[in-house]
Image: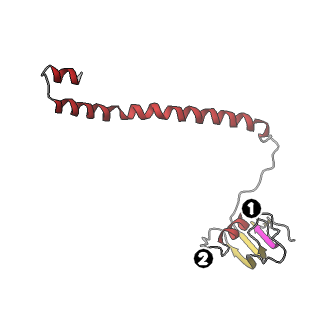
Amino acid sequence: MGAYLTIQDLSTAGVMIAASIIAARALAPVEQSIQGWRNLSKARESYSRLKEFMAPYEASGNATQLPELQGQISLQNVFAHPALDAKPEQGEEPLIRNVSFNIAQGTILGIAGPSGSGKSTLVRLMAGVLPAMRGKVRVDGAELTEEA
């Protein structure tokens, strides 16, 4: 339409270009919505499949009720290796050696050190993801690891 009006000398080329830019900016949210709709429909479909997959695993009414976490963490004489199976190669030294500390409820702990010093290994131990080679890791008095 802008080209037609410009050819007929009813408007200038600058007006046509300005109108084109304004129209593109005005329609940008609509175009983004159309592009986002595909992602939204895929997310809905994925959620539906996940819900269907997890249906057999829903907790029954007689599930064990756990007490609310208090947040106390303690490590006693813990030795650990960063390998998730906690079975390092023969003769390989553990990265965490004889670590003991208590973190009281509400306390904030910062862990700093150079790369490879055991920060992530220590956090994995406290979360119960990594088993200790030796020693005890407890959260609110419940032991997360079995002493080897």
Q: Is residue 38 magenta?
A: no
Label 2 sits on a secondary structure element that is: loop
For the residue pair 104 and 144, the one nearer the viewer reads as 144
Q: Is residue 137 magenta?
A: yes
Comparing labels 2 and 1, the label whose residue is closer to the camera: 2
Q: Which residues are magenta?
A: 133-138
- Residue 51 drawn at (x, y percent): 70, 36
Chain-order first, disc 2 or disc 1: 2
Q: Residue at x 47, y 33 (%)?
A: 35
Q: Judge left or right: residue 31 versus residue 12.
A: right
Label 1 sits on a secondary structure element that is: loop
- Residues at marks 2 and 1 touching, judged by CB atoms closer than 8 Å: no
- Residue 133 drawn at (x, y percent): 82, 71
Which residue carries the number 1 mark?
A: 129
Q: Judge left or right: residue 30 versus residue 14.
A: right
Q: Judge left or right: residue 14 versus residue 35.
A: left
Q: Is residue 114 above or below residue 53?
A: below
- Residue 39 drawn at (x, y percent): 54, 35
Q: Residue at x 79, y 70 (%)?
A: 132
Rendered image quadrant of residue 48: top right
Q: Residues within 10 Å of mark 2 (few under 14, many from 20)?
A: few
Q: Residue at x 60, y 33 (%)?
A: 44
Rendered image quadrant of residue 106: bottom right
Q: Residue at x 65, y 73 (%)?
A: 116
Name the image quarter holding the N terminus: top left
Seen as rendered, the residue at the extreme right is: 148
Which residue carries the number 2 mark?
A: 114
Amino acid type shown at disc 1? Val
For the stretch drawn in magenta, what is the main secondary structure?
strand
Q: Residues within 10 Å of mark 1 (few under 14, many from 20)?
A: few
Name the image quarter holding the C terminus: bottom right
Amino acid type shown at disc 2? Pro
